[in-house]
Image (cartoon, rainbow, N blue to C red):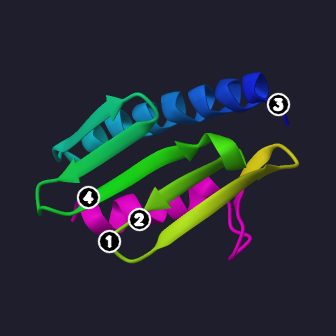
Amino acid sequence: MDANTFYSLTDQLFNSVESFLDNYADEHNIDIDYDIHGNVITIAFTNGSKIILNTQEPLFQIWLATSKQGYHFDYLNGDWICNRTDKSFNEIFTTAVAEQAH
């Protein structure tokens, strides 16, 4: 993977995260605050918990920190896959949001 491909893929992922958070908050009638600063998204829930998502350019990875654990994702076969659990980013992220938002 080259840097331009990585940045394009991470931009797509960050946009889908924003859309997911907006839709989730509306569907569940809850407040979810998120800030994007460069290559980092900080997601804050009303209960005080946070999720941090950031890019690791030298490794061409996405890192996700939840209240339970940290995850590292590689882009494989068209999806971001955790290098320890083999689960997709979407599966881990949506589970973490559901757990931390309530």
Q: Which callout, 3 or 4, points to the residue nearer the camera?
A: 3
Q: Amino acid at mark 2?
A: Ala
For residue 72: magenta?
no
In the rendered image, which residue does mark 4 sit on? 50
Q: Quadrant of residue 87?
A: bottom right
Q: Which callout, 2 or 1, points to the residue nearer the camera?
A: 1
Quick one: SS at disc 1?
loop
- Name the side, left or right, on which 2 lies relative to 55: right
Q: Amino acid at mark 4?
A: Lys
Q: Mark 1 or mark 4: name the one nearer the start of the chain.
A: 4
13 or 102, which is in the foreground? 13
- Name the side, left or right, on which 46 lies relative to 9: left
Assess disc 3: are there few (<14), some (14-19) or many (≥20) residues with their C-alpha within 10 Å of its C-alpha. Answer: few
Q: Mark 1 or mark 3: name the one nearer the start of the chain.
A: 3
Quick one: SS at disc 2?
helix
Cα–Cα gap, marks 3 and 4: 31 Å
Cα–Cα gap, marks 2 and 1: 8 Å
Tell me what residue is drawn at x 34 percent, y 30 percent. Answer: 37
Cα–Cα gap, marks 1 and 4: 7 Å
Q: Amino acid at mark 1?
A: Ser
In the rendered image, which residue does mark 2 sit on? 96
Q: Is residue 69 above or below residue 64?
A: below
Tell me whether the residue at label 1 lies in contact with that at label 4, contact meaning CB atoms closer than 8 angstroms.
yes
Q: Mark 3 or mark 2: name the one nearer the start of the chain.
A: 3
12 or 97, which is in the foreground? 12
Residue span colored magenta? 81-102
In the rendered image, which residue does mark 1 sit on? 67
In the rendered image, which residue does mark 3 sit on? 2
